Image: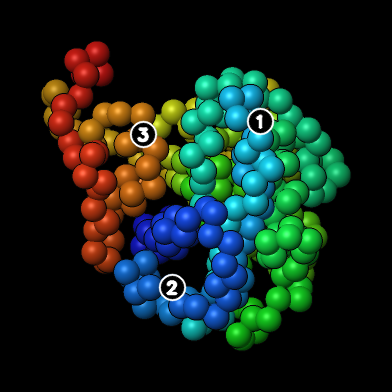
Amino acid sequence: MDANNAIQFGQLVAAAYTVAPTDLSQEAGKTIPASFDPYGNNYSVITTIYSNDLATDMNPDRDKHVVSFGYVLQDKNRNVVIVIRGTSGIWEWVHDAEFLYVPCPVTSGAGSTDDGFTAIYKALSVDALLQNSLVASLATLKFNLPVNSITICGHSLGAALATIAALDVTANTSFKNPTAYTYASPRTGDPAFASAYNRSVPNTFRIANRSDVVPMLPLPPMYEHVLGLVELNTAGTGNPPSVLVNYSIPCEHMLTTYLYLLGRLPGVTSQQVPLDASCQPKSLPTALY
């Protein structure tokens, strides 16, 4: 994996997080700010992405609210990037511990996917009325230039949606070789889904912090991760180990933490993304020494 690419695509997901979920403005034609474009690729918004939010047992009415979820972008080199953010509802999903699944919605014979993720995925749209499916619309979107490549990326819940989308793009569009970058993805489907995905989307980089609880769920054997693991670690070297990030469940999961850790990898040429102020390192619990 090229860490510079991972940081660039993660920064684009971070740009999607700057938009309030309740802001349903269509941002087509706007340009991603330079602060989220460290390599100067000049990403322009082709369309905003919308869907219902994640319903959970703790908040069953969440899926009655349409929210913005990200963008379809295109850069100056004709590359298209689909970016999908996460949601605060992921924590309710973690606490619910009822990880049911339904048939994969994008192609037959691809096993099953989490029911909550699937409901959101099926509603992903390029309009706030949820009438035009995201992946089906790729054939008719008004791109600035002929499309050179498609990369699909997301964080947390958005990573699970990006995983389903990558299989959908491969199975149901003319873009047969997408690349996927996911950050902090939970397991998205059962072993049959993972197997179908692995055959179809080999260009996958599933980036996971080993101390983040979300990628640990739902548990196997009902669910299985897709391949492409790139593991990050918030504990440094030494005895006791040095501490790179304050050890807390939210800090281990934040996209900024992932980008900070990626920035420490060899060969990174962009300016390092700083940690969230609340995640500045303190000390590791003794039990982790």
* Farthest residue, direction bottom: 145
Determine which residue is flagged by label 1.
Answer: 60
Q: Which residue is at 68% across, 61% downward?
A: 128
Establish if 28 lies above or below 190.
below
Residue 38 located left or right of residue 204: left
Quarter of the rendering occupied by the C terminus: top left
- Mark 1 falls on what kind of element? helix
Q: Residues within 10 Å of mark 1 (few under 14, many from 20)?
A: few
Establish if 98 lies above or below 120.
above
Measuring from the top left, give residue 183's x and y in whole percent: 46, 46
Determine which residue is flagged by label 2.
Answer: 32
Please state which of the two labelled residues, at mark 1 or mark 3, is closer to the viewer. 1
Residue 9 located left or right of residue 282: right
Measuring from the top left, give residue 221's x and y in whole percent: 65, 21
Q: Amino acid at mark 2?
A: Ile
Quarter of the rendering occupied by the N terminus: bottom left
Q: Amino acid at mark 3?
A: Pro
Q: Residues within 10 Å of mark 3 (few under 14, many from 20)?
A: some
Determine which residue is flagged by label 3.
Answer: 250
- The disc, 3 or 2, on the residue closer to the chain's N-terminal end is 2
- Mark 3 falls on what kind of element? helix
Measuring from the top left, give residue 214's x and y in whole percent: 48, 32
Q: Which residue is at 70% across, 76% downward?
A: 141
- Mark 2 falls on what kind of element? loop
- Total marks shown come to 3
